[in-house]
């Protein structure tokens, strides 16, 4: 766990200091692999598509243990995998592109990069904030949770599952697409739940938890497997709406998209620091025990 925490801190620091690292995290190799499996379909295609890269990752980790300076080499390998899994788009760079765009049309165009499903993002505080929350889940929090839980192979499985389940251009057959999307949603469930509670802690507790409860009361059982973790979107919308309503009584004075995006970005950063702090406490407890 200590090595995983160190790896995560180095990766996040590198992305903060060198945002251009995001440019090499394309999906070209994975797309070619998916195309090579065009003769298969259904569950078999999903299984092969995801299992082979993850198995190769596990094999690489096992092989590194046999080499001199294995700990250092494993850290470097884990760092490379984690940097790849934080893609394919640079989360912070996408937010900065919105905030620094020179005009409204440019900002609205930049906001579309937050969508991993290809769905359009409307230019209003609630819609942009919700898209930013989902982007944070799939480009930061989800990757980190499975990295801490299962190591580089877990982070790689999460990243590839999200790509396979959400990128319509990969040309999967209907059965494989439905299964891969459900699997991606399944991997989203735990980090999304933890994100809601962390966002409540660093934001507006009553509004966030209230929206989370209402979503679960109204949603059909297991609907999140088909539609995704909508409770996270509901929580993000509630957090933004309560902030707008907490202004001076005039929503138009507090519903500025850029201002709300800055506030949400700060809240998500505090949530990320909270996650890292919990992991650090776990590591410290292990050292003291």
Image (cartoon, rainbow, N blue to C red):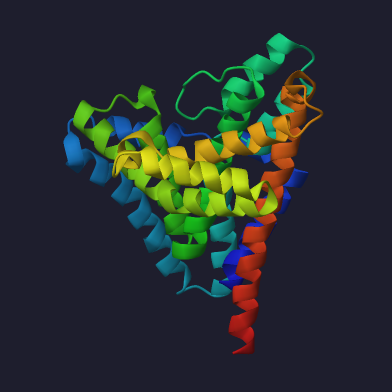
Q: Residue at x 36, y 24 (%)?
A: 168
In which quadrant will I find the N terminus?
bottom right
The percent position of residue 284, horizontal first and vertical second, equals: 65, 79
Give whichever of 53, 206 is nearer the camera.
206
Q: Residue at x 60, y 34 (%)?
A: 132
> Is residue 51 visible to us here?
yes
Question: Where 177 falls versus 103 (above or below)?
Answer: below
The percent position of residue 269, horizontal first and vertical second, equals: 70, 48
Give whichever of 41, 223 is nearer the camera.
223
| View extreme (bottom): residue | 289
The percent position of residue 42, horizontal first and vertical second, equals: 18, 36
Q: Residue at x 41, y 68 (%)?
A: 62
In which quadrant will I find the C terminus?
bottom right
Question: Where 41 falls versus 209 (above or below)?
Answer: above
Give whichever of 29, 104 is nearer the camera.
104
| View extreme (front): residue | 249
Q: Residue at x 18, y 42 (%)?
A: 44
The percent position of residue 32, horizontal first and vertical second, equals: 36, 32
> Is residue 72 visible to us here?
no
């Amino acid at each position: 766990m200590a090595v995983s925490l160190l790896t995560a801190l180095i990766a996040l620091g590198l992305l903060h200091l060198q945002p251009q690292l995001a440019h090499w995290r394309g999906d070209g190799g994975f797309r070619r692999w998916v195309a090579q499996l065009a003769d298969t379909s259904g569950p078999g295609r999903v299984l092969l598509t995801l299992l082979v890269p993850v198995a190769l990752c596990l094999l690489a980790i096992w092989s590194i243990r046999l080499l001199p300076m294995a700990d250092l080499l494993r850290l470097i390998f884990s760092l490379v995998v984690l940097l790849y899994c934080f893609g394919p788009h640079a989360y912070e760079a996408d937010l900065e592109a919105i905030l620094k765009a020179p005009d409204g049309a440019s900002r609205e165009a930049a906001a579309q990069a937050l969508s991993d499903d290809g769905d359009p993002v409307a230019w209003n505080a609630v819609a942009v904030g919700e898209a930013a929350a989902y982007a944070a889940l799939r480009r930061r929090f989800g990757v980190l949770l499975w990295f801490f839980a299962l190591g580089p192979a877990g982070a790689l499985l999460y990243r590839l599952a999200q790509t396979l389940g959400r990128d319509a251009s990969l040309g999967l057959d209907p059965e494989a697409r439905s299964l891969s999307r459900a699997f991606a949603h399944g991997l989203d469930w735990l980090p999304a739940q933890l994100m809601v509670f962390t966002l409540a802690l660093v934001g507006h507790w009553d509004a966030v938890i209230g929206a989370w409860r209402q979503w679960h009361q109204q949603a059909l059982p297991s609907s999140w497997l088909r539609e995704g973790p909508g409770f996270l979107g509901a929580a993000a919308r509630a957090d933004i709406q309560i902030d707008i309503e907490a202004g001076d009584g005039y929503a138009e004075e507090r519903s500025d998209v850029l201002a709300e995006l800055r506030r949400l970005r700060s809240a998500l950063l505090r949530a990320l620091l909270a996650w890292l702090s919990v992991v650090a406490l776990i590591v410290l407890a292990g050292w003291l025990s």
